[in-house]
Amino acid sequence: MEDRARAAAEAARAKSSDSEALRKNYVTPGLAGQAIATVDNSRSFTPNLACSKTATLLEVMVQPRTTGDLRRVVIARDTDLDGTLDRTFNLPVPVSGICANGVVSCSPGTWQACSPFRWTVDQAAAPALEKVDLSALAGCYCINASCGSNLAWSNIASVLRDIGGGAIGALTTADPRFGVAEAVIDGPVIRYVGAQSTACASNPSLPQSSYRANPALIASDAYSASSSSSVFQALKGSTIGTGTALTSRHCKIERRITVLKPQPDQVISRTSGGYATIGSGTAFDFLMGSPADNSLSGGSCSLVDFRMTLRVSEPDRIRDARLTHFFADDWAQVRIDGELIGSGPTPWSSHGLPPGKCELKKTFHSYPRLDLRPYLSAGDHEIWLRAAVANEGEAFAQIHVEVDDSCRTDEHLVDGCTPIGADPACRLESELVDGVQTWVNGIATGLKPLPQTRLVGGASCPGEITRDFFQKDRTYRCTLEALARPDTSRGAYIIDHSTEVLLADRIRRSDGGYATPTRSFNLPDRGQVAQCEPVCKTRAPKANDAVALDGVVAARQNVPTGYDTFYHACSGDNRCPMGPGEELVAACGCLDDFPEAAAMMQTLRLAGADMVCTGAAP
């Protein structure tokens, strides 16, 4: 059950973990009239969310000048979604800075004589600019030469996304009928693929958009619609609404067949430690230690530990696993999960110093070819190489593993009908076995399907399997009494009087009184869960091009560049999915940056307070 839950969670996460996944899997195909698959990709359907679609709803082209400002910004729009750009708008001012909802225009190449503008739409629903105070804009940054060299060209993709995003935001806010399915960047141009939603109305003032401003209206409007609906009132007064007397229950008996062909590294893999994994087909050699001559320094006598973790997922597929070779200068021990499996040059079983002189002035080699399969059960196993080094030395251990990656068939029946069929109030109404109707209206038809042969696997593991049936679809008709209001007093008594170790109950006796027995109980073990979801912290260099009311931020700083900080959820193998240009700051783990965040917020609060006097001078 836990494995199925984890698999379902991973599948859902792959479909909708971030904005890019949501756009790719749902938004773009939904607005473009393409197929959308369920989380497990077992089914798909083609929605109809748009009345009309266009390859280019909006197109933005920018042209930087030598001063770094955008001397030309051209916005073209398809107003009637017929596939033709029929309206063009040229920004009347050069762009020196970009904001999330507008632009800033200054004297070219400087941050002087600046005028902030916010995106809006004109009477013809075309993108336009209106002059506002800088405080009305958000997320502003500088792109001209006053903040750095060639910022616009070197960051053309983000410049296009920010300008286009502001224009699109103003357009869709003014006209909620339109939705954006995708944005495509081509050189200095960004194109937005758009569609009109199923409102299919000529008036952009849709009644549905009023719910965004006041969500409470949905409940009241729904109640008003149901009160005036004769169909709803008929259902409400029927036995379905007041208490069902007869109901149908559907279930399936399904034969699930899975052909498994794992990759060799899915059978056993090195998750930490060691320094190399050498693979050749279905064989692996895991190497650990420090084999270079005199690469270890020990002084008079030092113990040096090397640890390597092997993760075994399918132990029954391990055909051979052996400790093939280890050596050391001067002494060595090899343990697996703490159990000693080899030592030398003479027996050394303790956790302390070796039983003889530490300095042997030579390197010994051992080739035990010890079978390790009894030790490699499913789970993680730690290989421990300990070396005793006097003066200088080295140590090495090699584990050779061969795995079976052949195709195997996993077959089992999933019977969802047993609990329904065991209910005496239910009887079989109809049954469909692999497309053959074997029961109709509670009567057996006498038909049954012939044994079928199906192809299983795929190109990598083709095969055939023959069975009497693969799927049974059943419908049961069950009789139910009218639903009465349940008596919850007993449940309330149990909840109010029970503790973590004591279960209290209240049972009605035959004389009408109540018995209140108690008994001890323990909650079942709920299993171990991870302390947290592992995350990692990275950073990428960026120019300090942010803008505030007092001017460009970089002008108030000693260093013209800074860093953007990112947090990523780690992958299943505990790896950090770093983006381009990012460097690792903190590896995968349970990171707690609350003190840093609190310090930053306090710094901003105190900086905002500044040095303002709140009392009169004495």
Image: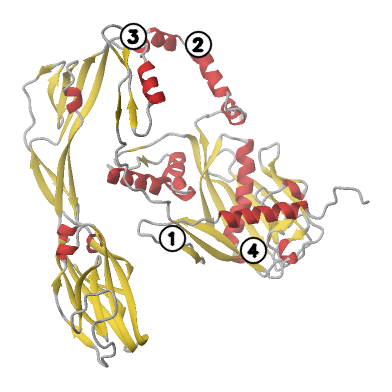
Q: Secondary structure at mark 3?
A: helix
Determine the residue positioned at 49% across, 57% down.
591
Up/down of 12 relative to 442, above or below: below
What whole-number distance in Å separates the C-alpha atoms at marks 3 and 4? 69 Å
Which of 274/11 is in front?
274
Which numbered disc, 2 or 3, marks the residue closer to the eye? 3
Where is mark 1, residue-wise? 588
Name the kind of residue labelled 1 in the image.
Cys
Q: Secondary structure at mark 1?
A: strand
Residue 393 falls left or right of residue 146: left
Q: Earlier in the sequence, mark 2 or mark 3?
A: 2
What coloring was used for the rendering?
secondary structure
Name the kind of residue labelled 2 in the image.
Ser
What whole-number distance in Å separates the C-alpha atoms at marks 1 and 4? 34 Å
Where is mark 4, residue-wise? 152
Where is mark 3, residue-wise? 239
Where is mark 2, residue-wise? 227
Which of 454/426 is in front?
426
Up/down of 450 relative to 109, above or below: above
